[in-house]
Every structure is written in structure tokens, then in C-alpha cells.
Image (cartoon, grey):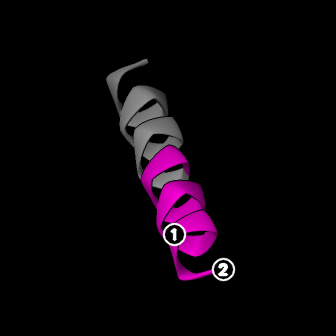
Amino acid sequence: MALALWVFGLLDLICLASANIF
């Protein structure tokens, strides 16, 4: 469960980073 939350948080950060780039 904790690992799933960590992966979800990582994907969220990547989406925010790509949104800032574009």
C-alpha cells in the first residue's frame, strides 16, 4: 500500500514538472 502511494506521488510530481515545462 505504501509503495503504491509512493508511485502515485512520483507520477503526480512528473505530471506537475511536465506541465511547468510546457
Which numbered tag is attached to residue 18? none
The residue depicted at 54 percent of the width and 81 percent of the height is 2
Instruction: Give x and y (percent) for residue 1.
Output: 66, 80
Please tell me whether residue 21 is drawn above or below residue 13 in the rendered image: above
The image quadrant of residue 14 is top left
Secondary element under disc 2, as helix, strand or loop, is: loop
The residues colored magenta run 1-11
Please tell me whether residue 15 is drawn above or below residue 10 in the rendered image: above
Total marks in image: 2
Q: Is residue 17 left or right of residue 1?
A: left
Look at the image and tell me in which quarter the C terminus lies: top left
Please state which of residues 6 and 11 is positioned toward the viewer in this rendering: 6
Q: What is the three-letter code of the residue carrying label 1?
A: Leu
Q: What is the three-letter code of the residue carrying label 2?
A: Met
Instruction: Give x and y (percent) for residue 18.
Output: 42, 27
Q: Residues within 10 Å of mark 2 (few under 14, many from 20)?
A: few
Separation of residues labelled 2 and 1 (CA atoms): 5 Å
Please tell me whether residue 7 is drawn above or below residue 19 in the rendered image: below
9 inside magenta stretch:
yes
| Residue linked to disc 1 | 3
Secondary element under disc 1, as helix, strand or loop, is: helix
Please state which of residues 6 and 21 is positioned toward the viewer in this rendering: 6
Q: Residues within 10 Å of mark 1 (few under 14, many from 20)?
A: few
Mark 2–mark 1 CB contact (< 8 Å)? yes
The residue depicted at 52 percent of the width and 38 percent of the height is 15
Q: Is residue 8 left or right of residue 10?
A: right
The residue depicted at 52 percent of the width and 45 percent of the height is 11
| Residue linked to disc 2 | 1
**Prevalent SS, magenta region:** helix
Q: Is residue 8 left or right of residue 18?
A: right
